[in-house]
């Protein structure tokens, strides 16, 4: 049960971090400019976004594995 909650926490944290960092990257663009979100990421922004995506993926995998084990 503890690992299930850990996995869900990692999934939530990774999702919020990924979304927040992408929103912060878009806010650097001039108002009215249209571009893709991933086009706004430069340098170390990619590392942080990939870190949060990996955290969300690991959390999802851990939560699914533990949910199957508990049931």
Image (cartoon, helix red, strand yellow):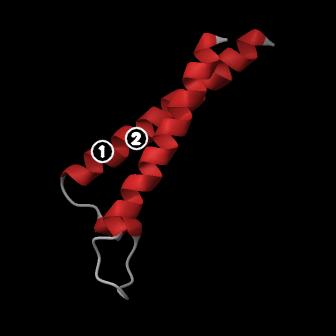
Q: What element carries label 2?
A: helix
Task: Note whether 58 is above or below 37 in the view shown.
Answer: above
Q: Is residue 53 left or right of residue 68?
A: left
Secondary structure found at label 1:
helix
Q: Residue at x 75, y 11 (%)?
A: 70
Q: Is residue 45 visible?
A: yes
Residue 3 versus residue 31 in the image, above or below? above
Alpha carbon separation for disc pair 2 and 1:
6 Å
Q: Where is residue 59 in the image (x, y as percent from the top left)?
A: 53, 28
Q: Can residue 61 be seen in this view?
A: no
Nearer the observer, 59 or 31: 31
Q: Which mark is residue 18?
A: none
Residue 3: percent from left, percent from top: 59, 14
Describe residue 17's horizontal placement relative to residue 3 as left or right. left
- Residue lying at the far left in this picture: please name it: 43
Give neighbour class at mark 1: few <14, some 14-19, many 20+ (Cα, 10 Å).
some
Q: In the depicted view, which residue is nearer to us: 61 or 8?
A: 8
Write the residue at 29% across / 76% down.
29
Q: Is residue 60 left or right of residue 29?
A: right
On the image, which quarter does residue 43 sit in? bottom left
Tag 2 residue = 52
Residue 48, numbered label: 1
């Amino acid at each position: 049960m503890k690992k299930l909650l850990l996995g869900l926490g990692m999934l939530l944290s990774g999702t919020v971090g990924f979304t927040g960092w992408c929103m912060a990257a878009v806010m650097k663009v001039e108002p009215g400019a249209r571009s893709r979100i991933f086009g706004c990421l430069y340098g170390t922004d990619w590392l942080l976004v990939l870190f949060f995506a990996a955290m969300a993926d690991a959390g999802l995998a851990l939560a699914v594995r533990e949910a199957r084990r508990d049931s």
